[in-house]
Image (tube, grey):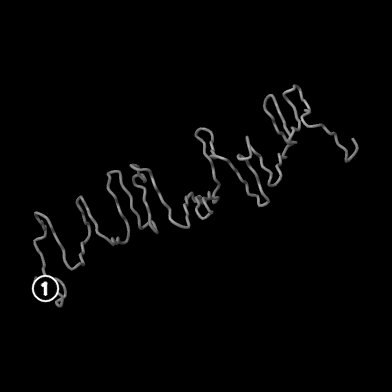
Amino acid sequence: IPATKYISVPNQIPIVFSTINDKVYADSSSNMVVEGSQDINLIPGINKKVLIPVDKKLAFYNEQQYISGNLLNDLTIGAGNEINLIPGSGLSVNIPVDSSMKFGNGNQEIYADSNNILYIESSTDIILNPSTGNYIKIPANKELSFGTSENSMYGDTGGILVITNNGTTITDDLTVNKNVYVDGDLYVTGDTSYVNSTSVLVEDNTLVLNAGPASSRDAG
């Protein structure tokens, strides 16, 4: 066939391979149709690729389910419904180190660094909201840290909550329904201390009153 010439096959006239069910043709809307009685394999040469042009969609079923790439090397996966990623049994969906999964406008993201630290970042609040009757569970002896590892809390296997830091400030009322054990000193700086109990037991045989500076002493 001379250069610039071509073979013209009319619409809906197939080129048939092996059987009538293996064919290539253009339909009445000028769509190219490739049909096979079994699998259709695209096999490029060694180290070559199957190339889909920029901004051209590879669509599934209809245009609402598709994959496409743009000039910025962004890959877009679109769907008219849910997108399911289903690896094999016991396998994972792997996201590379320092590559984030973003939500919304991109300011909410999850990623892991080269030290295997998982980051959850947001430009506003991060809300953990389990359904009614369920909990946010942190395993025993796993610390929840604030600021640095020196400020943390965890629950041990005996059901005891341990708070470790350089000092705890509580800015509102504190109600404790069980016993309170203080290994160190107990300082009360308020004006009045109330003890509403049946018995007060003091192990030490010395109880000092008016121990403050002379100017502040009040015999009561």
Q: Is residue 220 above or below residue 161?
A: below
| Number of dots carrying numbers | 1
- Residue at horizontal 38 percent and vertical 45 percent from the top: 130
Residue 128 placement (x, y as % from top left): 40, 49
Name the image quarter holding residue 169: bottom left
206 displayed left or right of 10? left
209 displayed left or right of 30? left
167 displayed left or right of 110? left
126 displayed left or right of 7? left
Foreground residue, 119 or 209?
Answer: 119
* Residue positioned most to the right: 2
Name the image quarter holding residue 164: bottom left
* Residue positioned most to the front: 28
Q: Is residue 148 above or below residue 212?
A: above
- Residue at horizontal 69 percent and vertical 29 percent from the top: 40
The C terminus, quarter of image: bottom left
- Residue at horizontal 63 percent and vertical 35 percent from the top: 61
The N terminus, quarter of image: top right
Residue 4 placement (x, y as % from top left): 88, 41
* Residue positioned most to the bottom: 215
Residue 2 placement (x, y as % from top left): 91, 37
Residue 209 placement (x, y as % from top left): 11, 68
Q: Amino acid at mark 1?
A: Asp
Q: Residues within 10 Å of mark 1 (few under 14, many from 20)?
A: few
- Residue at horizontal 70 percent and vertical 47 percent from the top: 54
Q: Which residue is mark 1?
A: 218
Q: Is residue 127 above or below residue 216?
A: above
* Residue positioned most to the top: 19
**SS label for mark 1:** loop
